[in-house]
């Protein structure tokens, strides 16, 4: 099946949700190429960027699960090929 490369941006406003975000990312670890997380203490948030390579269905599944977590905002951008 065809895969796409992209980036998923995650902003965590409710720091209690960070554990759930990490659990979801671990569930989809097979398609994560790289990850960078920055705690922005002055604002009380965390920002995570994840480079992914997976099928559209798998990527949608991951972003959908992340988007349902309280205090989490998710945006993604994928290659067209």
Image (cartoon, rainbow, N blue to C red):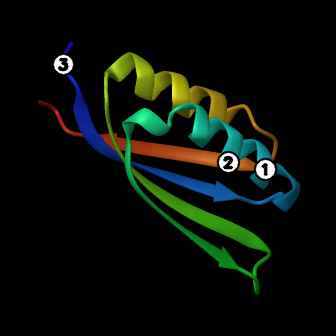
Tell whether 46 sits left or right of 36.
Answer: right
Which residue in the structure is indicated by mark 1? 19
Q: Quadrant of residue 26?
A: top right
Q: Quadrant of residue 54?
A: top left
Tell whether 54 sits left or right of 80.
Answer: right
Picture disc at residue 2: 3
Q: Nearer the viewer, residue 30 or 80?
A: 30
Q: Is residue 78 above or below residue 73?
A: above
Q: Quadrant of residue 32?
A: top left
Q: Residue at 67% across / 75% down in the picture?
A: 39
Q: Is residue 20 above or below residue 65?
A: below
What is the crowding at mark 3: few (fewer than 14 residues within 10 Å), some, or many (at least 20)? few
Q: Secondary structure at mark 3?
A: loop
Q: Nearer the viewer, residue 81 or 21?
A: 21
Q: Quadrant of the C terminus?
A: top left
Q: Is residue 19 above or below residue 5?
A: below
Residue 27 picture location, percent across and down: 59, 32
Cα distance between the residues tagged 2 and 1: 5 Å
Q: Secondary structure at mark 2?
A: helix
Q: Quadrant of the N terminus?
A: top left
Q: Residue at 72% across / 31% down in the picture?
A: 68
Q: Are marks 2 and 1 in contact (CB under 8 Å)?
A: yes
Residue at the bottom extreme of this rendering: 42
Query: Which numbered disc, 1 or 3, marks the residue that appears first in the sequence?
Result: 3
Residue 20 picture location, percent across and down: 77, 42
Which residue in the structure is indicated by mark 2? 22
Tell whether 39 sits left or right of 16.
Answer: left
Q: Residue at 83% across / 61% down in the picture?
A: 15
Q: Residue at 46% across / 24% down in the picture?
A: 60
Cα distance between the residues tagged 3 and 2: 26 Å
């Amino acid at each position: 099946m065809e895969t796409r490369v992209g980036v998923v941006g995650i902003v965590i406003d409710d720091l209690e949700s960070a554990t759930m975000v990490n659990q979801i990312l671990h569930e989809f670890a097979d398609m994560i190429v790289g990850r960078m997380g920055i705690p922005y203490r002055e604002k009380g948030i965390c920002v995570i960027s994840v480079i992914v390579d997976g099928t559209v269905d798998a990527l949608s599944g991951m972003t959908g699960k992340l988007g349902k977590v309280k205090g989490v905002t998710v945006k993604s951008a994928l290659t067209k090929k």
